[in-house]
Image (cartoon, grey):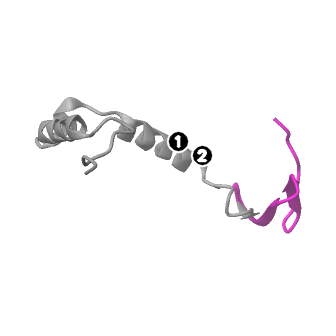
Amino acid sequence: MLVLSRQRDETIMIGDEIEITIVDIRGDKVRLGINAPRSVQVHRKEVYEAIKRENTEAARVRVEDLPDELPKLRNHTRDASNRRRPHGRPDAKAS
């Protein structure tokens, strides 16, 4: 870990596009200003970890969480795929 000392209104650069400025220092709290491209997500670590946990939980699928209509949808999809014609076959007979 790189450790730097900075005073109020001094800036740290990360790459060419990310600036971290010391905005205020009061007691044991430091306020940071972060200037970064919109493509770079910036979160406090506790928020970032909560987002990761929520995303992991949301990605888990349990059968009991699925709607009752899912088996009907699966059967409907299977029936529709059985009705499709093989690739390259015309749908109607030529006269």
Q: With 59 as the anchor, is 3 left or right in this view?
A: right
**Which residue appears farthest toward the front when viewing the image?**
95
Residue 37 or residue 67, whichever sits in front: 67
Q: Secondary structure at mark 2?
A: helix
Q: Which mark is residue 45?
A: 2
Front in this rendered view, residue 87 or 77: 87
Residue at position x 87%, y 52% in the image: 15
- Is residue 34 shown above or below 68? below
Indicate whether residue 21 is drawn in magenta.
yes
Q: Residue at x 20, y 30 (%)?
A: 63
Disc 2 and disc 1: Cα gap in Å?
6 Å
Q: Is residue 46 left or right of residue 37?
A: left
Q: Please tell me how many numbered marks the rendered image carries.
A: 2
Residue 72 in magenta? no
Which residues are drawn in magenta?
1-30
Label of residue 85 in the image: none
Q: In the picture, which quadrant includes the N terminus?
A: top right
* Crowd around label 1: few <14 · some 14–19 · many ≥20 (10 Å): few
**Residue 56 percent coordinates (x, y):** 43, 36
- Where residue 28 sits: x, y (%)? 70, 54
Which residue sits at x=16%, y=37%? 79
Amino acid tagged 2: Lys
The image quarter in which residue 8 lies: bottom right
Kindly check if marks 2 and 1 are in contact, taking CB atoms under 8 A apart as contact: yes
Residue 33 percent location from the top left of the image: 73, 65
Q: Amino acid at mark 1?
A: Glu
Q: Is residue 20 left or right of residue 71?
A: right
Residue denoted by label 1: 49
Q: Residue 53 sits in which quadrant?
A: top left
